[in-house]
């Protein structure tokens, strides 16, 4: 079962989605499995960024 999201996005966002995830927004909108895959990758990237910031903060305050 897929539910279209009716997202609003710019050409720049479309280009970034394709470069980062190899799909366009219409594919993302229409396919729940692809959405979950993209969001999982985004969550992992976010967590890595938080960890890097924490490490840098620690290094600065030594």
Image: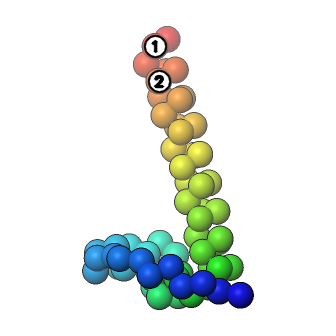
Residue nearest the observer in this picture, 32 or 16: 32
Locate residue 25, reporting x and y percent.
45, 82
- Badge 1 marks a residue whose secondary structure is loop
Q: According to the image, label 1 marks what residue?
A: 61
Locate residue 31, reporting x and y percent.
62, 85
Residue 23 seen anywhere in this rendered image of the structure: no
Residue nearest the observer in this picture, 22 or 28: 28
The relative height of residue 38 versus residue 31 in the rendered view (above or below) is above
Residue at the location (64% across, 62% down)? 40
Q: According to the image, label 2 marks what residue?
A: 57
Residue 32 seen anywhere in this rendered image of the structure: yes
Locate residue 36, reporting x and y percent.
65, 71
Q: Quadrant of residue 1?
A: bottom right
The relative height of residue 20 versus residue 53 in the rendered view (above or below) is below
In this view, the residue farthest toward the left is: 11
- Badge 2 marks a residue whose secondary structure is helix
Residue nearest the observer in this picture, 7 or 22: 7
The reply to whether the C-beta atoms of the residues labelled 1 and 2 are less than 8 Å apart is yes
Crowding near pointer 1: few (<14 within 10 Å), some, many (20+)?
few
């Amino acid at each position: 079962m897929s539910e279209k999201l009716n997202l609003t996005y710019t050409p720049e966002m479309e280009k970034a989605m394709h470069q980062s995830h190899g799909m366009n927004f219409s594919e993302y909108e229409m396919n729940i499995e692809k959405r979950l895959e993209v969001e999982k990758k985004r969550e992992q990237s976010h967590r890595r960024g938080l960890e890097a910031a924490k490490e840098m903060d620690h290094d600065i305050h030594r």
